[in-house]
Structures are given as C-alpha cells and as structure tokens.
Amino acid sequence: MRRLSVIIPVMNEAEKIGNILQEVKKLKPLEIITVVNGSTDQTSSIAKTMGAKIINYEKPLGHDIGRAIGAYHATGDILLFLDGDFVIRSQQLLPFVNAIHSGNDIALNDLSRIMKRKGIPHAVSIVKAVINDYFNRNDLSINSLVAVPHAMSRKAIDRIGWWNLADPPLAQAIALHLKLKIVSPKYVDVISLNKVRKKDHVILEKGSPYPKSTSLIIGDHMKAMHYIGKVLGKRGFYYNDPSMDKNYEIPKKNKNIKRSIVITVNHKSQDFLKRIQSLKKDKLAEEFIVVLAGTDKNFMKQVKKTGALVLPVSSSMNTYAMRALGASLASGEIILFTESHSSMNQIELEPFFKEIEKGADISLNNVSSLLKARPTDPMQLLYYFLNISLKKPELLNNSLTITPHAIHRKVIDQFGWKSLEVPPLAYVYAITGNLKVKASNSINKENLQSQDSVQMKSIYEDHLKAFHYYLTVTNKRGGFTKGSKNYNELKKLKNKDW
C-alpha cells in the first residue's frame, strides 16, 4: 500500500485522542500528524506517547487551519483527514484510503442520504450542494471537504494548494474546476457523533441569522463562490433589441394608472386569450401589456382584440428580457409580471397587488413547499442559496426569477428596467437596498415549467452575476464571519518555502 499520512487537528481532546489514535494505527500509516492547538490538557503528551508526530501551537488556530498545516507537514502519498472530536473505527476509514490507492484524487464522506430526509434542508446542506452543481457534479449531492473523514492524493494537494484546505469549500471548488477524480466511497455518520456546543451551534453570530458554526461554513462557501466567479466568468447583460412590428409605436405612459400587468408569451394559446379577457372583465388592472415572441400575425391580432397592448419581439429573446421590455412600457404604479402558461385569475393575482399596496416593494410567489420535494430541484437549491448568502433565510427559495410577482414602480425607477433582464441581480439590488420583500402568496407552484439545459445554464449564470455583485459590495466571505481562523500561520509557512 502507498504511504499514508493521517492528519488530526486537536484541541483539549485528552479523553478521546487515545482511542482515536488506536483506530488510526490499525491502518499502519507512515505517520500520524496531530496539530495540537490551544490545548490546556494532556492531549499533546498522550498523542506523543502513542507515537504521533506533534505540531504544537499554544493558541487556537481556528477551524480548518490545522488541517492545512497538517497537509503542509505530511510526507505520505495519501492523506487521510480526521477530527479530534470523535472516534471512527478503522474499518470505516479504510474505504477512503483504498479509493485513493485505486487512482482517485479525493474520497469524500457520502452524506447524500441527508438530502432524502423530510422537511426543508439545512442551510449548510444547501450551500454544499450548489457548489457541486456549479461544476455539473450534482451526483456528489452535499458531499464535501467540509466533512470528515476524507482522503486526498498528494497530487491533489499539490494542485489545489495545501493552504487552500483552510477553507474546504474553496479547496473543493478548485478540485472540481481542475476536474480531479472525486468519489464518495462510504457513509460515516459524523452528524450524531459531533457534539453540540451552545456557543458554536445554538447562539446566533452577531450580524447573522445563523449560529457561529453555520455562519463560518457559509462564509467559506462564499469564498468558493468568489473563486467560481473568477474561473467561470462574470456574465454581462444579454439584452438584445427586439424585432418590433414596423408599425408599432411605443405609447406615452399614463401617470394615472395604478396597476399594470406584463404577460410574456412564448407559445400561442387560445386558452390564454380567454384568461386575459377574463382578467380585463374583472378589472384587475387598468393596463395589460403582452410581450409576444414570434411573428404569428393572426394570433397577434387576436391578442390585440382583447384590448391589450402587444409588443412583438424576436422568438430568440429570452423571457427575462421580454419582462424587462414590458416593464419599460408599463405605466402602472404597481407592475405584476406573469407568463401565458400560468393559470391567471383575479383571485390568484389580486393578493400580489394588495401586498404592494400594503407597503411591500416586491411581492414574490411563495414556492417554499418545493424545497420539501425529493429529489429537490437544483434550481430551488440555487434560489435558496442566494437568500442564505443575503442573510434572508426566511425568504427560503423564493425568487424574482419565478412568476407571478409584483414590483412597485419606485423599484424599477431606482434600479432601471434593464436590471430585470437578470432577475437575481435585480433581487440583490433590492435586498442590499433594504427594500421590503414579501412572499406571502402561493400559486401555480405545481405548474412551474421544468427548465431545459440551456435555461438552467442561463439561470446559473444569472446567479453567478448576482453573487459577484454581492461579494463586491460586501467582501469575499459575503460579510460572514471567518471565526478565529489564523491565516497568518499559513502565510508564515508559505513564506518559508519561497
């Protein structure tokens, strides 16, 4: 077997370190490296007595710094990473070592079954899954370098950079971008073994809706998103001028209009004509704007007969650009956006207008129940991740990408109608601008159209731009804590190598 280095960061684990090392020694490793930091008990002397190599720091290093330092000092071809909090039997550790011995670069703990549990997934699970999804590795689910045990080849360490292990999600994003061979050979239940500390796991971190440990992990994932933005690129606006009817004239806006409805139409439907006639009959809004993709003149005439203002555009224009164009024409103080394939009636749409009239700036369609579906739609996880990063967990997966939704005129005037071409970015503008966003109304969630691969790519790109903007106005961690991570110790070792 190739040479094995086992790395264990520890602090005040005198009660457990002996049992941990007993199991590790059964693997017959080349070396066991214990990075003892901030310990005031007998952890160091016990580990030394049992033959472990001791790297001692008087003060705590903070989460995952010890892991990176251990990797720096390791000399093996295979590196196995553990924590000093709990004992894992050697037979459970062996599959991770064997996976690297078989030619893989990284072997992760298979925690994917957690995503099969009932209820809304934990925020940490959401952010883990989305990082993998950005690199088309949804097969990895929530499996991540955040969790132990995991093993890595020396080649993987060298390519990722040992110092990047101080932020496991960042290391994972680098590995995914480099297309390293990543597998998940076994499930080890570390969730129940991990002891709950009130200070880290219960009490909320200052300035965050999450406890310290969760805030720290989210911040690490935001660093990963910053990296993803650099390597996958920051997409610019993709607006194209529409192919309007030559005889079409943009009307002057009527400032006295209270309500406008913008409807995007990608597929002609006689049923849609009946629905819009019904809405006009119910006097839900004073103005109806239909943005129609394609050049079917007969259908266009039928839509115009309903009394709606029709804006014909190129069939190649995406839905979000169509919405933005509709917004540019709308005169209403409140603008509701919907699509022709959605069920539309007064009972369902009236509450969106009412929400704005009561003081909200944006009223979203509440589709939070979709987070309980199994398997969970990757798009819903992405929407939730954005709200997590914005420190708005109460908004869950509700998004400006999903219709119907309503927006107050002042929002569009503030950010410009073209901002609606990238809904997640417009959404970040709104949240960072302290606008009032509500998601009280829930309709059509069962009728949401599935996205094809092209649409999904566009949505991922839209969110990447939104994340990039948010990281620009906050910092690389999205304003989340770095805890007590002592990056200076990593810098010392890096400088030592130069």
Image (spheres, rainbow, N blue to C red):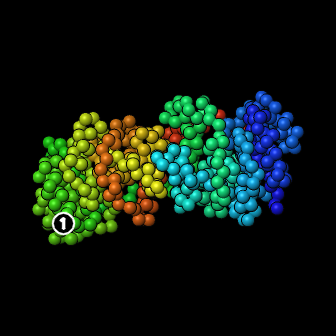
Asked if one can make out residue 278 in the rendered structure from this viewpoint, the answer is yes
- Residue at 65 percent across and 37 percent down: it is 195
Q: Which residue occupies the foreground of this view, 276 or 225?
A: 276
Q: Please tell me whether residue 451 is drawn above or below residue 491 in the rendered image.
A: below
Type of amino acid under label 1:
Gln
Asked if one can make out residue 488 in the rendered structure from this viewpoint, the answer is no
Examine the image and state in which quarter residue 357 appears. top left
Circle 1 packing at 10 Å, graded few (<14), some (14-19), many (20+), is few
Left or right, 231 with reference to 275: right
Q: Please tell me whether residue 39 is drawn above or below residue 135 in the rendered image.
A: above
Under tag 1, what secondary structure? helix
**Quadrant position of the N terminus in the picture:** bottom right
Residue 305 position, x and y percent, is 11, 62
Examine the image and state in which quarter residue 437 appears. top left
Residue 365 position, x and y percent, is 32, 47
Left or right, 327 with reference to 108: left
Left or right, 302 with reference to 386: left
Q: Which residue position holds label 1?
A: 270
- Residue at 58 percent across and 58 percent down: it is 140
Residue 119 position, x and y percent, is 46, 46
